[in-house]
Image (cartoon, rainbow, N blue to C red):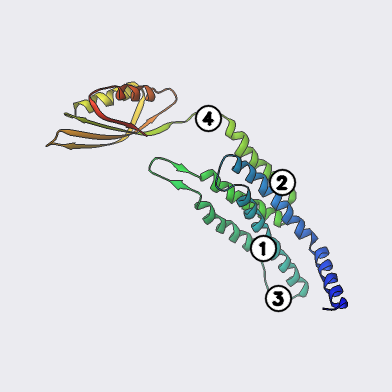
């Protein structure tokens, strides 16, 4: 490669950087906004933290930027056979990110975790799409609202019903179950469902109660009372 070829390549790169400077600025802004949300998620020990949110926001913005640039080039060349709609690209990004967010949700028999992280990944992709379209004010406002939702609203103490599973085991008849249900009612503990298993040959009984108690209930006191009752061979709370 001689000096003239190198100079020509350098001029082409410089011209490309100048013409695409606004698009590169959008990518930097997307990286910044995605990083702000990612910092909040990582500070709470979530798997989808700083790097994940930056990549999601950056990738979403990049898709929109590329489609928008291609649409502009096609309109300048005036080729009617080429029709590029950035709105379709945005819809594809939002839909695709849903699968990534679904991977962060962990569901078990007693709880569901990761919904907020999945929602934050989805809204970060929306921030990236907004930045890719060049709407910096809307994207900045959206980022602030997301941070308020994730950080400030997390500090507000909200009381809600608590759910748990009470497992009991004993040897004898089922009359003891009526005493347990009466004790739970007295403590304002509701029973949503119950599974009773009895073994006639051994006389062993096994009961699983799905319970619900609010702020004013005495569920923990009732559990402590059951645990100290010597008639039970098994008392488990989860």
Q: Alpha-carbon distance for marks 4 and 2?
A: 28 Å
Q: Alpha-carbon distance for marks 1 and 4?
A: 41 Å
Q: In the displayed structure, does residue 5 sit left or right of residue 92?
A: right
Q: Which element type, helix, strand or loop, lies under badge 1?
A: helix
Q: Name the residue carrying label 3.
A: 80
The reply to whether dot 3 and dot 2 touch (C-beta < 8 Å) is no
Mark 2 closeness class: few <14, some 14–19, many ≥20 residues within 10 Å: some
Q: Position of residue 142 (x, y in %)?
A: 67, 45
Q: Which element type, helix, strand or loop, lies under badge 4?
A: loop
Of the numbered discs 3 and 4, the one sitting upstream in the chain is 3
Of all residues shown, which one is farthest toward the left?
A: 201
- Against 160, residue 98 (above or below) is below
Q: Nearer the viewer, mark 2 or mark 1?
A: 2
Q: Name the residue carrying label 1.
A: 86
Mark 3 closeness class: few <14, some 14–19, many ≥20 residues within 10 Å: few
Q: Alpha-carbon distance for marks 3 and 4?
A: 57 Å
The reply to whether dot 4 and dot 2 touch (C-beta < 8 Å) is no
Q: Position of residue 234 (x, y in %)?
A: 27, 31
Q: In the displayed structure, does residue 28 sit left or right of residue 53?
A: right
Of the numbered discs 1 and 4, the one sitting upstream in the chain is 1
Q: Name the residue carrying label 4.
A: 158
Mark 1 closeness class: few <14, some 14–19, many ≥20 residues within 10 Å: many
Q: Nearer the viewer, residue 9 or 219?
A: 9
Of the numbered discs 3 and 2, the one sitting upstream in the chain is 3
Q: In the displayed structure, does residue 39 sit left or right of residue 212?
A: right
Q: Nearer the viewer, mark 3 or mark 4?
A: 4
Q: Alpha-carbon distance for marks 3 and 2?
A: 36 Å
């Amino acid at each position: 490669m001689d000096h003239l070829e190198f100079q020509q390549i350098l001029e082409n790169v410089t011209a490309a950087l100048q013409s695409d400077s606004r698009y590169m600025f959008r990518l930097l802004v997307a990286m910044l906004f995605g990083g702000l949300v990612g910092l909040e998620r990582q500070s709470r020990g979530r798997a989808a933290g700083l790097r994940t949110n930056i990549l999601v926001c950056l990738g979403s913005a990049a898709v929109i930027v590329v489609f928008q640039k291609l649409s502009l080039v096609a309109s300048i060349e005036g080729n009617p056979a080429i029709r590029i709609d950035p709105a379709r690209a945005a819809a594809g990004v939002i839909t695709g990110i849903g699968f990534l967010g679904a991977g962060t949700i962990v569901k078990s028999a007693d709880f569901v975790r990761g919904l907020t992280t999945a929602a934050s990944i989805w809204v970060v992709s929306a921030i990236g799409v907004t930045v890719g379209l060049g709407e910096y004010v809307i994207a900045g406002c959206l980022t602030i609202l997301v941070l308020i939702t994730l950080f400030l609203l997390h500090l507000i103490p909200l009381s809600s019903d608590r759910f748990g599973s009470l497992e009991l085991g004993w040897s004898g008849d089922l009359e003891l179950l009526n005493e347990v249900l009466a004790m739970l009612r007295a403590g304002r503990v509701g029973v949503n469902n119950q599974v009773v298993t009895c073994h006639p040959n051994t006389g062993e009984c096994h009961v699983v109660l799905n319970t619900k108690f609010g702020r004013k209930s005495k569920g923990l006191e009732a559990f402590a009372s059951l645990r100290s009752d010597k008639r039970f061979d098994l008392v488990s709370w989860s």
